[in-house]
Amino acid sequence: MHVVKAINSFTPTKWQFQGHTFQFVLRSNFNGTGREPGEPAAKKADIVFLVDSSINVGRANFGEVMNFVSNLIDTYYNDRDDLRFALALYDTDVTDAFFLNSYKNKDDIISAIGQAEYKGGRRINTGAAIRYVQDKHFIKEKGSRRDEGTPQILILFTGGRSADDSKTAALGLKKTGVRIFAVGVGDILDELENVASESSTVARASTYVGLSELNEQILQALDDEIKGKPSDVYFLVDTSWSMGEQNFEHVRNFLISAIRALHQVGGDKFRFALVQYNSRPKTEFKLNTYPSPQGALSHIRAMSYDGGGTRTGFGLDFLIRMVVVLTDGRSQDDVTEPAHALHLAEVEVFAVGVQDALDSELRDLASKPYNTHVFSVESFLSLKDIVQDLVVGLCGKQTITIHTVQGLFY
């Protein structure tokens, strides 16, 4: 069995289970917290505002921009959140208003924003300003928690075109893992797109008074970055003759346990799809087939065992077209090329071998390091013993508690 975990360019976490004949793939941005189902996730991030304070904006409009920043923070920051904010103003150079570790509560942050002073320079060097915040704000000494895996976000506001190369500077910052939101007013869409991480992190208003209309768009994009987009979980189940009816029942129970555990940890943060494969892949249900885990669980309970030959490579090729892939332990075709394609696509693969699964094939499929991505169990009944380790591995340094409930693990 093999498990594949797809990882997006930002902070995706994904995981999969694989075994002698069962494979499970999870593609997700979920950041585990161990909270109860249905409980809203606390937000954790380091967010730096870099604001154009030149004549492009003007003194009167500068007040509108500061109100816009204050309103964003006031709306987004709840008491249970672990958010840090910083503010820097720029024209040809940069003035620090406060750093990520300057204030610990929302009232103090908003008060400090209200005291920010307009600079009034005649031009802006956005590239130099971006390099400045990279060196002076996104560092541990000033409160950055990058080393802890905390999302790092720059929200750049500009009212005009830069006099220097902002695109190259933005690329350098992105390479450090910082996500860039570009917000502006007027006919500067190309300027914003040059620095933003992607189209969803670009926001533009026609007037300064209209900045408030961008709030919902920006807050949703922040949620996607900080909380993670819904996680897409693909199960690729080997139903070849080598499994047999009895072991298929163990795999069925394992699928049910895995979905229950994921729902317990992540609530509605997961969507599920299921594909059986032997000689050919067969889609049982797609990501949008069932709006709730209950529908997926009912389908799995009614699913029949097909039987056939094991062609893991073919199954991988099939799922590559679906973005995420899972595979089996002992394949009758080549898995190296499809697995390599997955790795190039930034899909993280966890391989779990059951019984006589080939260790060499598991390593061909799995991502590195192997000690955290390859698992072996002696029987299908033992699959339940690796759920906790896989969940912890999926979430990196995060510790996830799966509360034991009757019937959760078989």
Image (cartoon, rainbow, N blue to C red):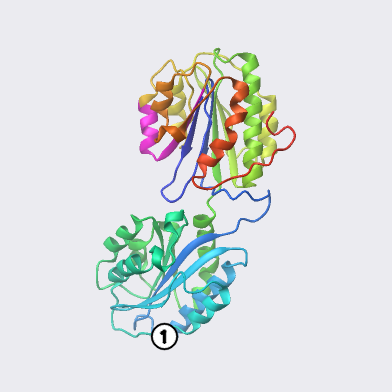
Q: Which residue lies furthest to the right in this view?
A: 406
The image shows residue 168 at horizontal and vertical percentages of: 27, 61
The image shows residue 100 at horizontal and vertical percentages of: 45, 69
Does 268 sit left or right of 3 as displayed?
Answer: right
Q: Residue at x 54, y 54 (%)?
A: 227
Q: Is residue 60 magenta?
A: no
Q: Assess disc 1: are there few (<14), some (14-19) or many (≥20) residues with their C-alpha within 10 Å of its C-alpha.
A: some
Q: Residue furthest left?
A: 164
**What span is colored magenta in the figure?**
337-353
Which quadrant of the structure image shows residue 155? bottom left
**Position above or below: 313 against 408:** above
**Position above or below: 266 against 347:** below
The image shows residue 284 at horizontal and vertical percentages of: 60, 28
Q: Nearer the viewer, residue 9 or 150?
A: 150
Labels in figure, total:
1
Type of residue at label 1? Glu
Q: Which of 305 and 226 is in front in this view?
A: 226
Secondary structure type for disc 1: loop
Q: Does the magenta stretch include residue 344?
A: yes
**Position above or below: 177 against 279:** below
Asked if one can make out residue 304 in the rendered structure from this viewpoint, the answer is no
Q: Which residue is drawn at 53% across and 65% down?
A: 83
Does 337 sit left or right of 63 as displayed?
Answer: left
Q: Mark 1 points at which residue?
A: 117
Q: Which residue is drawn at 63% across and 22% down?
A: 381
Asked if one can make out residue 71 in the rendered structure from this viewpoint, the answer is yes
Which quadrant of the structure image shows residue 297? top right
Report the quarter where the C terminus lies. top right
The image shows residue 47 at horizontal and vertical percentages of: 46, 65
